[in-house]
Structure formats: structure tokens, C-alpha cells
Amino acid sequence: MNIGHFPPPKRNGLIIHGIIILVLAVIASIGFINLTRVDAGPAFLVSLLIALLSFTPIPFFVYRAYSLRQADYHLDRDSLAISWGLRVEDIPLSDIEFIRSVDDLTHPLALPALPIPGGLLGTRRHPDLGAVEFLASDSKKLLIVATAKRVFIISPENPAGLAQTFARATELGSTTPTEAKSVYPSFVVTQAWQSGLARYLWLSALFLNIGLFIWASLIIPSTPFVAFGPQFAGSALEAVPSSQLIIFPLASLLLSITGWIAGLYFYRWEKERVLAFIVWGSSTLTSLLFLLAVLFIITTPV
């Protein structure tokens, strides 16, 4: 019996997510570069808005691409395990009422919001099924996994093979009773928040970044030029528009977000949690160093 892995289609989804991330990164980079070339004013605000709006979704799409890369449906005689990034659903076969194609529905199934190939994720309501949760990548290969409590929509590369294997596994019966398990990404955040050290590091990095943004926004309008750029022994200090200081809070925020997400990744495992605290501590220290760098720059006479 073909019991094992039935992963979802990934190639097209990864390509599309990669293109989206690349386009957003290019737009954000152009916006950040323009910030260093314009003076404070409308052009500066427009460049800042473009940079922030294009950069903000990047971690979201990076996580979706990572989730798709790790996605899998594993079926054996005891359970169906659905893994999608930090989202894990382990369903005992005895809890599954049926697995069938969405084409069997009398009412069409509406896709979730932002139905990008490779990332059909979210919850929708159906007249017959009620609330359904999508953990799928391809709208043409959708299967319904119905239990007494929840209904899931998945998209294995071989839908017919998974459905036939499920039918065969239920005929043979379970060898070892298993318990249902649900893990959500928010669970990792909640679990980490319960740690006093994690809360301290998160809040420290947050307040340092907020303070850095506020400080830079106050300096830029009141100080036309600052000493910024590579300085060589015996050379005169190079004065540049103070608008270039915005690079520091933006870079600090980028590194803090990256460190926060990386720390959550390590925090999932008990043995790796030391690495999570090291990453979060490094992010806080980096934000502090950016703050000190701005202090040195504005106190250097030009």
C-alpha cells in the first residue's frame, strides 16, 4: 500500500512568490536609495512611503514561500499529518469522515483571500460544509478532508492517490491510536511571550526602534547637514543632507524583524531555544548600536 508523503505542487508557487519578493525588494531598494539623495520635503516623504509600503509585505511573502517549501501531507494507517510552515495538523484516521474532491460539491467552494498559486491559505464558509480551512497550493487539485469538528482543504500533487490510499488505510484499520494535534504560528509567539527574557528583549528592541525613528524624524528637519560617509585620515569631513539619517532606523527595523522571525523559528524546539535568545539579544544590541551611531554622527561638527 502506497502510504507515505503526498506533497502539494510547489514549483509554480515558489516561482511566483520569488518574483513578488524580488519586485518588492527592488522597489524598496529604489525608495531607500532615493531617501539618501533628496532633502527633507515632499519628495522625501514620497520616497519614504514607497520604501515602507514595498518593504512591509516582504516578510509575509518570505514566510509563505518558506511554508510552501516545507509543506507536506503525510498519510499512514494511523493519521493524516498536514504540515504547512509553522502550521501543523495531525488528524487520526478514525476522526476523518471522508476525503473527496471539491468537484463533488453542489455549491462551488470560494477560494480564500489573496489566492496566489502556492499559497491558498485561510478560512472560508461554505453552505454545506460550514467553516473550511485552506492549506493548499493548487486550486485545480483540491481535496476535502472532513472531520466531526473541522473541515480542511488540501491539494496533493496526486489527489486520486491520496484518496485511494486513505480508503485502503481505513479498511486495514489503525495499528496505534493517535491523538489529534493542532499547532498554529500564533502558538509559538504566545509560548515565547510567556518567557520574561523574551518579553524583555522584544520590548527593548521595539522601543529602541521607535525611539530611533522619532529621533531621526526630529533631527532631519532641524539639521540641514551631518557628517556622514567614509572618512579618511587627514581628509575633511564630508557633509551630506541630514535626510540620509533615515537609513539608520530603517536598517535597524529590517534587522530587528529578521531577527525576531529567525528567533521564533529556533524557539520551536526546546534544544534550540538558546539560539533564539541569542538572536533576539543580538537584534536588541544592534538597535542600540544604530542609536549610538546616530548620536556620534550628529555630535560630529561639520
Image (cartoon, helix red, strand yellow):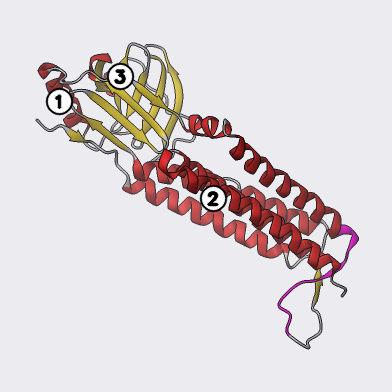
Mark pair 3, 1: CA separation? 23 Å
Residue 113 location (% of width, % of height): 49, 31
Question: Identity of the amino acid at label 1?
Answer: Gln
Q: Which mark is residue 164?
A: 1
**Residue 9 relative to residue 78: left or right:** right
Which residue is located at x 80 percent, y 49 percent?
A: 214
Say which of 249 and 240 sits in front.
Answer: 249
**Residue 14 relative to residue 250: left or right:** left
Question: Identity of the amino acid at label 2?
Answer: Ile
Say which of 101 and 184 sits in front.
Answer: 184
Which residue is located at x 65 percent, y 54 percent?
A: 285
**Image quarter of residue 241:** bottom right
Secondary structure, mark 2, is helix
Is residue 138 located in the magenta-colored stretch of the structure?
no
Q: Are marks 3 and 1 in contact (CB under 8 Å)?
A: no
Question: Does residue 269 appear anywhere in the picture?
Answer: no
**Image quarter of residue 78:** top left
Q: Which residues are magenta?
A: 221-232
Residue 245 location (% of width, % of height): 76, 62
